[in-house]
Amino acid sequence: MGGKILRRIEKDIAEKIERAKKIIFFLDYDGTLTPIKKKPGLARLDRDTKTLLKKLAKRASSKVFIISGRSLKDVKNLIGVKSLYYIGNHGIELVGPGLKYINRSAKALKPFIQKSYNILKKKLRFKGVILESKTYTLSLHYRLVNSDKVPILKRVFKNTIKDLLKRGKIKITEGKKVLELHPNIKWNKGDIVNWVLRRLKSRRAIPICIGDDRTDEDAFKALGKRGISILVSKNRKKTFAQYRLNSPKEVIKFLYEFVD
């Protein structure tokens, strides 16, 4: 089944790729380039995938942006390829050859995120919970928490920071086994994708965006028909993406086509 999906996508977009002068890749990290792990620190790229990204980045006709919910520092350390562009915190910060960006509104609200982290660190005493500070956002991973404790954990999480939430400076989002706290601003992965495309001003460039989680839907929606959007999921689901691949393994096979 997966092989058929991959071949169908390759055939469907072949003509678009052939006409493009440049390809701009926007690739999510966890669940896209590497399988999701129980602990965030265990999600590391294998050597072959890192080599693949280096080859893609070296091509004159392509640029590669890693667009992650992780902090910029974290995702850079995990991959460690200098020729790539890195986007952290769902689009709040970006760095790469000739480009740099930090969202000013998010930067101004950084103290509210840090205060929330300090409060939650003292209050949350659930076995298996991982509370991660990412400077401009924070994540509460509950993949290792017993399923019967998750509803209580979510309730305690929201109640602990309810006073800060009332001030309208921060907001809660949910992902795959994670609760996240963001600055309450109108900025997401879709906005940073548009920002990048405006800065590059590449004629006949085609953006290809691949991701697996809810925040990637913002990027898929922003691209619309201008580019190629691919959801990574074993199951069919409602999405703004045009295509679907089953797993990170299929994503890597797809990306190898652009090297070969």
Image: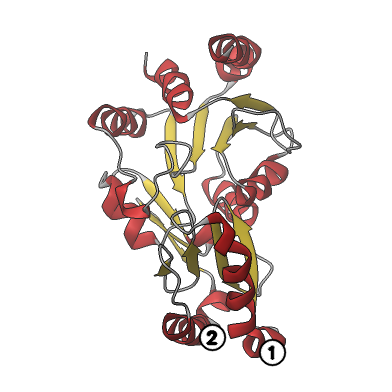
Closer to the camera in the image, 132 or 47: 132
Q: Quadrant of the C terminus?
A: top left
Closer to the camera in the image, 93 or 89: 89
Q: Is residue 243 left or right of residue 27?
A: right
Q: Amino acid at mark 2?
A: Phe
For label 2, the residue is 112
Residue drawn at 34 percent across, 45 percent down: 43
Q: Position of residue 156 (x, y in %)?
A: 59, 77
**For residue 133, above or below residue 165:** above
Q: Amino acid at mark 1?
A: Arg
Q: Quadrant of residue 253?
A: top left
Q: Position of residue 79 (x, y in %)?
A: 29, 45
Q: Quadrant of residue 241?
A: top right
Residue drawn at 56 percent across, 66 percent down: 180
Query: Is disc 2 surrounded by few (<14), some (14 to 19) or many (20+) residues within 10 Å?
Result: many
Furthest-right residue in view? 238
Residue drawn at 64 percent across, 51 percent down: 190
For label 1, the residue is 167
**Residues at marks 2 and 1 touching, judged by CB atoms closer than 8 Å:** yes
**For residue 4, above or below residue 44:** above
